[in-house]
């Protein structure tokens, strides 16, 4: 398997890219040896405790005006009742040591001594090391189901945002108590909570928001200690950047966004000036690396797109506040990233869960569904002056980032008359047929990009379908990563998507290294051959080469025609196979969809939405319902149903399927 992987990688990547990967791996080992010498030296940690001359909360207050100015908070329960209720409950729980993280449900994380168990995966009752050098912290444990993301998530301190906007007077003291306890339990560069630079950056961003909210109330000793710990976070991030030439992903982007925030907040501190300049330079480059020309994040995941948009926003804003403008090129690409959210969002302001998902956010004022992305659009309108993004009501996150005046003056843009027909993100390979209420999203695009990628699924030519604002056919999402490799592999597989699977094989081969690492050879090489969308309907033609590698295999071509008058999508699949093959069509249903069948027609219902699915040709294979799963969020898995059609072919296959909507209200 190892030899085959090497040969395939060389064939796919070429010797130059393969050589660069070997070089980057070697350089990273050299850097880790240097890091080990520095951070295991007791003098390093002690030197970071020196007070910062001139440190004050004022720069943080300019970065987080909604945390510093509380006039908007009195009206918040009425303006955002549901979000505020969720946040108030989260704040009460967190103050008492109860947390709902990554599907745990509200769970007390207090130990017998009454202190928070910062190093534990409390879902699996497993403990990660607290006193080893961060480079030696294990990424997984032998305990069944243990997940390092649980202590990392807890130590991001993102519950501070619920404290800030629900009752800051009440929770300021609670935060300081928890902050002191965390600092004592997590010495710099020691233990699991320093093992991932990305999470160090998340925590630093949260701490700066707390500084904006309560820094003026800190006593002198607390303010000095707070500044020293922020500076330690900055030094650590700068020395442990997660940069790899071919695979920087969202980790490196988080690192530099965190450095930008720290550089802006710690400006009297000489190293902070260097951090800010470095972060600004890297953000200018990485914004264009992270987002394609159509604006979509190059990791090919809708929820990671949301995360990276939030990171780009806070990084850009930190540089702006500190007087280190990123320029029009960066601004324009971020605006396109916001517009990509608008393209993918349906009338309920939700997008399909395409690609990986770890439910990460940056400024999480309250719980939001992972499919919800469009709440960010008013932020894009206000911060970047893009009036077309002013869709829907102003979210509380806008007040946090821009202050009370912007919330008061915000006005939604005039919605265009008539249906808003589908558009495409052609670089990302996401094509929409239909309007906001009734829409199909088709995936046909790059498995990943160079140098960014890593959260892709084997989902070429897969479809999702929303009818009358209700999701009917869904992408099942992503349930977990290292805690259950078999589950991770399933959600990534072709069988977990609404496309054709041949002989039980995935569209591209996957090589697993360990519970954390895997590689995918992009054998599918998808291509959109035609796309149009307009008032009367639209058409898509795409194909991938993934099944050429099979004996007697071929390309899979999928054509979808949409007729707006009848609200009908017709799917044509063609595979020029030779010999005998087993072909499987799967349609993953939303968990709330009910199913009826008769005369070869399947009626799929959710609320007032109805969808009839009819297998037209060839001769009706018998459709069956099989049990399935749907990941609402990372760590949250529910049962659902999968409508499956199986066919044994003896040569070329051509199939036609009709999907027709029926809604009580189609206005």
Image: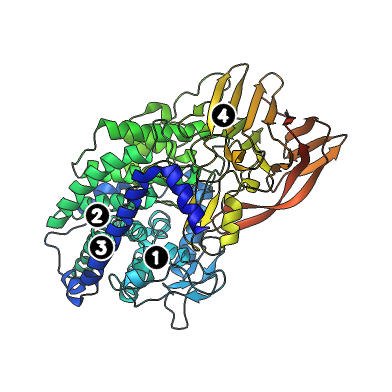
For discs 4 and 2, the disc positioned in front in the rendered view = 4
- Mark 4 Cα within 10 Å, few/some/many (few <14, many 20+)? many
* Residue 30 image label: 3
**How many numbered marks does the figure carry?**
4
Q: In this view, does 598 lie to the left or right of 331?
A: right
Quarter assignment of residue 448: top left
Q: Which residue lies furthest to the top in this view?
A: 536
For discs 1 and 4, the disc positioned in front in the rendered view = 4
Q: Decide if residue 347 is in sight here.
A: no
- Mark 2 Cα within 10 Å, few/some/many (few <14, many 20+)? many
- Which colour style is shown? rainbow
For discs 2 and 3, the disc positioned in front in the rendered view = 3
For the residue pair 108 and 174, the one nearer the viewer reads as: 108
Question: x%, y% of residue 612?
Answer: 77, 33
Residue drawn where x is 62% and y is 57% of the image: 637
Return the disc, 4 or 2, that comes first in the chain's sequence.
2
Quarter assignment of residue 388: top left
Tell whether label 1 touches label 3 (CB within 8 Å): no
| Label 1 – label 4 distance at C-alpha | 39 Å
| Label 4 – label 2 distance at C-alpha | 40 Å
Question: x%, y% of residue 224?
Answer: 19, 67
In the image, is residue 420 above or below residue 126?
Answer: above
* Residue 432 image label: 4
């Amino acid at each position: 398997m190892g030899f085959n992987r090497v040969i395939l990688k060389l064939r796919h990547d070429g010797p130059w890219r393969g050589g660069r990967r070997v070089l980057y791996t070697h350089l990273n080992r050299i850097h880790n040896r240097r890091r080990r010498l520095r951070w295991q030296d007791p003098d390093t940690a002690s030197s970071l405790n020196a007070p910062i001359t001139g440190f004050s909360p004022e720069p943080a207050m300019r970065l987080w005006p909604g945390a510093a100015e509380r006039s908007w908070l009195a009206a918040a329960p009425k303006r955002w009742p549901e979000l505020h209720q969720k946040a108030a409950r989260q704040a009460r729980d967190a103050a008492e040591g109860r947390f709902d993280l990554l599907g745990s449900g509200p769970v007390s994380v207090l130990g017998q001594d009454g202190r928070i168990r910062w190093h534990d995966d409390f879902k699996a009752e497993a403990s990660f090391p607290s006193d080893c050098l961060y480079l030696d912290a294990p990424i997984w444990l032998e305990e069944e189901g243990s997940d390092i993301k649980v202590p990392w998530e807890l130590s991001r301190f993102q519950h501070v945002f619920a404290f800030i906007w629900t009752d800051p007077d009440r929770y300021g003291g609670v935060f300081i108590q928890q902050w002191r306890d965390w600092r004592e339990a997590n010495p710099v560069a020691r233990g699991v909570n320093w093992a991932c630079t990305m999470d160090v950056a998340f925590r630093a961003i949260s701490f700066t928001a707390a500084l904006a909210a309560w820094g003026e109330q800190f006593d002198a000793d607390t303010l000095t200690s707070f500044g020293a710990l922020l500076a330690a976070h900055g030094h650590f991030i700068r020395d442990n950047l997660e940069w790899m030439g071919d695979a920087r992903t969202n980790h490196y982007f988080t690192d530099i966004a965190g450095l930008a925030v720290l550089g802006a907040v710690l400006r009297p501190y000489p190293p902070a000036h260097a951090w800010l300049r470095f972060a600004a330079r890297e953000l200018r480059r990485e914004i264009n690396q992270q987002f394609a020309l159509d604006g979509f994040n190059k990791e090919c995941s809708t929820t990671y797109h949301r995360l990276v948009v939030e990171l780009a926003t806070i990084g850009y804003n930190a540089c702006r506040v500190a007087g280190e403008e990123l320029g029009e090129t960066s601004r324009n690409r971020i605006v396109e990233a916001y517009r990509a959210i608008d393209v993918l969002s349906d009338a309920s302001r939700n997008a399909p869960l395409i690609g990986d998902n770890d439910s990460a956010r940056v400024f999480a004022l309250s719980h939001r569904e992972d499919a919800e992305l469009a709440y960010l659009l008013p932020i894009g309108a206000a911060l970047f002056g893009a009036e077309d993004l002013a869709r829907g009501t102003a979210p509380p996150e806008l007040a946090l980032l821009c202050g009370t005046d912007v919330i008061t003056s915000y006005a939604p843009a005039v919605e265009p008359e008539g249906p808003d027909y589908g558009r495409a993100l052609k670089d990302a390979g996401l094509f929409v047929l239909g309007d906001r209420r009734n829409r199909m999203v088709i995936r046909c695009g790059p498995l990943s990009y160079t140098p960014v990628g890593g959260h892709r699924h084997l989902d070429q030519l897969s479809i999702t379908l929303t009818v009358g604002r209700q999701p009917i056919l869904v992408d099942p999402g992503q349930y977990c990563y290292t805690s259950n490799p078999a589950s991770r592999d399933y959600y990534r597989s072709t069988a977990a998507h609404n496309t054709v699977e041949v002989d039980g094989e995935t569209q591209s081969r996957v090589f697993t290294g360990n519970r954390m690492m895997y590689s995918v050879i992009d054998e599918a090489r998808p291509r959109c051959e035609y796309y149009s969308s307009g008032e009367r309907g639209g058409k898509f033609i795409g194909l991938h080469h993934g099944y050429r590698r099979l004996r007697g295999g071929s390309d899979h071509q999928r054509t979808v025609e949409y007729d707006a008058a009848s609200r009908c999508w017709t799917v044509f699949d063609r595979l020029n196979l030779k010999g005998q093959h087993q072909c499987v069509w799967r349609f993953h249903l939303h968990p709330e969809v009910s199913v009826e069948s008769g005369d070869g027609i399947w009626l799929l219902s959710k609320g007032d939405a109805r969808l009839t699915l009819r297998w037209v040709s060839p001769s009706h294979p018998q459709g069956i319902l099989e049990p399935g799963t749907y990941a609402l969020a990372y760590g949250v898995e529910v049962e659902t149903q999968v409508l499956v059609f199986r066919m044994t072919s003896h040569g070329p296959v051509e199939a036609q399927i009709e999907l027709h909507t029926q809604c009580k209200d189609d206005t």
